[in-house]
Amino acid sequence: MHIQQLELQENLIYVILVRMVGVREESIRKELAILIALGGEEAVESGGLGVVRIADLIGREKSQVSRALKMLARSGLVDRDPATLQYRLGWRFFALAARAGEPRLLSVAPPLLERLMKRLGETAHLSVLQGTEVLTVLSKSPSHAVTAAGWSGRTVPVYCTSSGRALLFDHDLGALRELLSGVEFRKLGPSTVGDVGQLYERIVAARAQGYALVDEEFEFGLIGAAAPVVDFKGQIVAALNVSAPKFRLGGRLEAAGEEVKMAADELSALLGWSPDPL
């Protein structure tokens, strides 16, 4: 894992330990190191780690690690396998991390939207999937301030927007058919997809390059670029996108896609995601 990504993951664990579980500030480093070790590749592949191995990995005495693990186990942050006696991340750790993800998404996204808007000179959005529609939760335009209204805001169809396409990157054809069963593919723009099969082809192409581009699919003269945002589990939780009139952004659409992808990857890292194992 890169140093910056490791620091971001540590920040997320810090929030869980101090703000949600009540671990004392002075003991945070030890517990944090244990949890990171239990989230590492070795622990995942072997189904857990023993006290001695954890102590070796984090450079602490066995007795200190043993006491810390008992405390973490009482909190539900780690579990101990009764057969192997090895420790692994517990149910409460994942539950708390998931609960922290949504407010963290809203708190860390605005500066990235601001930067994306300034770099491209166009409106930038943070959106989530709501059924068969895309819900915008944050926006930043060259002439307007960032606004958030909880999870409420404007909705647009998922099948003809760049953000919708990015939010569907993890759907195979079967899941896509199930999601959009009963949805009428209305022709809103000159290039709107006509059915699920055509939509899936465009999703596959977009997934290969890491971002989705749409050209006059939602309405005439409007184009956009979007990329998915994933959480610490690698699951898609949102999408970043920019949209603008074709006469302004048309010649820069591919470049806009690259910019949006970089911003989305950075936002994903702030949520605890990493493409590399520990």
Image: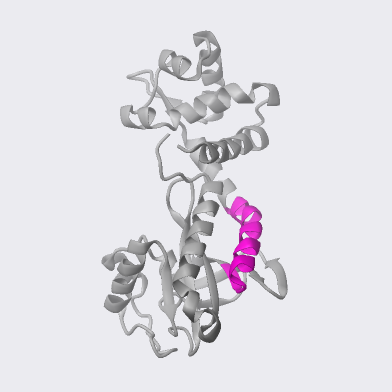
* Image quadrant occupied by the N terminus: top left
Q: Is residue 114 magenta?
A: yes
Residue 32 percent coordinates (x, y): 56, 28
Q: On the image, which quarter does residue 175 sit in?
A: bottom left
The span picked out in magenta is 102-125
Q: Residue at x 49, y 10 (%)?
A: 62
Q: Main SS type for the magenta part?
A: helix
The answer to whether residue 19 is above or below residue 218 is above
- State whether residue 138 appears in this view: no
Residue 26 appears in view: yes
The residue sitting at 38% across, 23% down in the picture is 81
Rendered-image quadrant of the C terminus: top left
Answer with left or right where residue 13 lies relative to residue 203.
right
Q: Quadrant of residue 173?
A: bottom left
Q: Percent x, y for residue 256?
A: 50, 69
Residue 89 at x, y percent in the picture? 45, 31
Q: What x and y, as percent, mark residue 59?
A: 51, 15
The correct choice, above or below, for 272 with respect to 159 in the image is above
In the displayed structure, 215 sits above or below 117; it is: below
Vertical placement of residue 52 versus 211, above or below: above
Q: Nearer the viewer, residue 48 or 255?
A: 255
In this rendering, position of residue 203 left or right of residue 33: left
Residue drawn at 47 percent across, 68 percent down: 255
User: 107 or 90, which lies in front?
Assistant: 107
**Depth check, front residue: 114 or 34:** 114
Q: Residue at x 52, y 68 (%)?
A: 241
Is residue 80 in the magenta section?
Answer: no
